[in-house]
Structure formats: structure tokens, C-alpha cells
Image: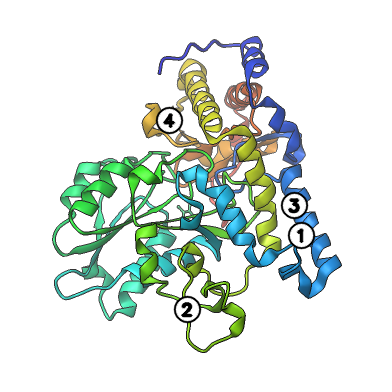
Amino acid sequence: MVRQFEDGLAFARAMDEQDPLRRFKERFYIPQDGIYMDGNSCGLCSRDAEETLLRALDDWKTYGIDVWSHPEANYFLYQDRLASLMAPLIGAKGSEVTICTNTTINIHKALATFYHPTPERFRILLDDLNFPTDKYAVDSQVKLHGLDPADAVKVVPSRDGKTLHEEDLIEAMTEDVCLILLPAVLYRSSYLVDMKKIADAARDRGIICGFDLSHSIGSVPHDFAAIDCDFAVWCNYKYLNGGPGAIAGLYINEKHFDRGPGLAGWQGNRKDTQFDLNMNFEPAHYAGAWQTGTQPILSMAPIEGSLRMFAEAGIEQVRAKSLNLTAYLMYLIDEKLKTWGFSYGNPTQDDRRGGHVALEHEDAIRINKALKDRGVIPDFRYPNVIRLAPVAFYVSYEDVYRLVEILIDIMESRAYEQYDGHRGTVA
Ligand SMILES: Cc1ncc(COP(=O)(O)O)c(C=O)c1O
């Protein structure tokens, strides 16, 4: 898509005037009234999320144990209500989505369900740019089967350390491979994987296919009815603004409901017989079967308010603004920051780019620290990437413009030179 951008504050303000989502920004708490560009690590608290969290707290105060079954509160089925609100973000049915535990545990749940190695088919296919927890989980599952990850986990290397070539991954789908797990959007470079191409190729070869949507959900819409992969996992604390450490998401394709969960617990039992407390597990016939223990209501509640905002805004509008903002940021980098040694390591094409820009500079650590001292909250990834996520709900075009002006000032004044180049333990 060709976009016409201009330099200058007036242009940025004009873009904000026309922005159909501009009303949402005032519903968020923006830390230090700064420019928040880290929604791909921890999304912001909205008044809507606060309201549903406080309502859950009130319900607990009012109902005690009856919070689970009270006709108004009825938190016993809260995960199903939230799943129905979340499913449209990925084009899935509400029955195929549930929210539980964290992303890493949900990978374990999926592998416990789908990974059944045989002497002929035992390999799991991964890429080398996914977030490491996915590999840790896969390695440990392989070991639980008495196998050696060095042999059973096949990691397809990226050609350039930034992108994945789908043809390389498909070529690696040999007969000994039984499962593939890939990210939808790469957490460093923002590269958006062609998920349908991968899922189609995997299905043709009888390979179970799963995706980690942590860096796409709430930013990039998915059409799971068309992608038709087997499972997916994701964090709800990034673009979904569910709160730090919010309970995570899990998608199970309905064609697998008969399998039941690999890891079972009483909350995954059929709801109508759960309180019969039989010793024999009767799995529910929907993604809710992958629930295990009691749901953390207070961790789930903010997600309700946040999902209401997505329903109100529409994920397509969110994506359209996000693409515009990242394109505008790239335009300003080209126009104004290249002379200072900046470049970006993310794809430029709309259909290949997630929700953030991977700004690169050899002094990125020090520049990142200087940005933080000037009220910009970015995110640093070693050795040279400053991730900038202009989240559609709470970042304006003026914010993007001001961010670039701040970067120019940091470079012109050489202010970044006063910071040390140590990484620290938390980036
Ligand atoms: C792609 C991806 N998967 C998983 C995680 C971690 O998930 P959790 O801490 O919920 O297990 C992250 C965290 O940033 C991530 O980026």
C-alpha cells in the first residue's frame, strides 16, 4: 500500500484529527504522561480493564464462595465468556479458545496433547528466532519421552537472523517430523510468518502445526478458520492489555476435541458433572477441557474490559492504524534518522510486518537509556535493537513524531554518550 506522509508536527496532528481510534487513548493510563512504545512487552492499563477488575473484586466481597455460581457473577464459566470475546481476534470459534495459566504452560499442555513420538516420527521442528521459552518447553517435553533434544528437536536456521523463509521450513518437514511450532510474529524483527502456507504444508504431510501468537494477537488479525492449524498459544499481557502476567490464551482446533487434554485437571471436566466429583475424568468437549486447576479470576478480569475495547474498535481498524503508525515511523526514520546511523530491521511490506519497528543502531543500549530519561518507554533487545511498538489504542501520530524529534535531540546533543553500555538484567 502506498502512503503519503509528510514531515512536521502539523501533519502528525492532522493525522490524529482523522484517526477513528483517537478517542481510545484517554481511556488508558499512560505512565508519566510519556510516550509508551513498549506495548509489545507489557500493554497498558485501561479504565475499562480497571473497571472489570474492580467489579470482580466487588463481586468477591459481596458473594464470597457464591461468586462462582451467582446468576449475575457466575465466574465458574468466566473463561468461556472471555473466550467468546477473544475468538474473533483470531477468526476462531469461541469453543476453540480458552484462557488459562501462562503461555509456556500452554505449550506444555499442547505438547502433552499432540506430541506422541514413534521411532519413525519423533522430531519437532522449530525456527531459531522464536522466543526461547518455546524451545525450553519443547526440549523438556522431548526429554520426558526419553529422547535427546539434540536429535529430536530440529531447528531451522534463519538465513539473515531477522526473517524466516517459509520454503526452508517446508523443506525441513521431512518424514521423521511429527510437530512444528513457530511464532506468528518474530519478537525481535516483527517479521510476520505466512501461517497459512506453513499450516497447509504441515497438514499435507500429517504434521501437527502450532503457533505462538504472543506478538500478533491484538495487533494482527488472524483467520484461523482458513489457516486451520492444530493449536496456538499466546500472552494476554502484550497487545491485549490484560495486565502484567495476565492469564494466557490457548486455541485447540475443534477437530481435536475428541482427543481430550494431555494434561488433565478437574476444571477441564464436563461442566454439568464437574461437581459430581467422580474419580474418572470426563473431558469437556471444547477447548475448556484444557483447563486444569481453578481459574485466577482476578487475573482474568482486566482482560474483559480490554476485550470490550477490541469489540468496540474492531481488530481490522486496530491493524490498519498500527500499520499506518509503523509505516509513518519508518518514513521518519528514513527522512530524519538515517544520517545518525539508524536503520530498521523489520520488514517493510504490510503483509509481512507485525506491530513494532525494530530500530537498529550500534549505540542502541545507550540511546535506549537516554530515551527512557526523556519520557519515552521503548524496549531494548541485545545487541542493537530498540523495539518501538506504536500501539493503535494509545499511541498517536504526534507521539511518533515527537519520539523521532527526541531521538534527533539525543544524537545532536550527544546526550547518549553519558550513559554506560551495560545491558543490565532486565531490558
Ligand atoms: C513469543 C513469546 N512466547 C512466550 C512468552 C512468555 O510467555 P509466558 O511468560 O506467559 O510463559 C513471550 C514473552 O515475551 C514471548 O514473547
Q: Is residue 27 visible?
A: yes
Q: Earlier in the sequence, mark 1 or mark 4?
A: 1
Q: Which residue is mark 4?
A: 344
Is 229 placed above or below 295 here? above
Residue type (three-letter) at the residue carrying disc 1: Glu
Which quadrant would the N terminus be assigned to in this image? top left
The kind of secondary structure element at disc 4 is strand
Residue type (three-letter) at the residue carrying disc 3: Thr
Q: Earlier in the sequence, mark 3 or mark 1?
A: 3
Q: Which residue is mark 1?
A: 72
The kind of secondary structure element at disc 3 is helix
The kind of secondary structure element at disc 2 is loop
Q: Which residue is mark 3?
A: 52
Q: Earlier in the sequence, mark 3 or mark 2?
A: 3
Residue at left 46%, top 27%? 342
Residue at left 25%, top 50%? 157
Q: Which residue is mark 2?
A: 282
Q: Residue 303 location in percent, x, y?
A: 65, 52
Real-space Cα separation, disc 3 to disc 1, in angstroms? 14 Å
Real-space Cα separation, disc 3 to disc 2, in angstroms? 32 Å
The kind of secondary structure element at disc 1 is loop
Is 368 placed above or below 61 here? above
At label 4, counting other C-alpha atoms closer than 10 Å, the crowd grade (few under 14, some 14-19, many 20 or more) is: some
Real-space Cα separation, disc 1 to disc 4, in angstroms? 50 Å
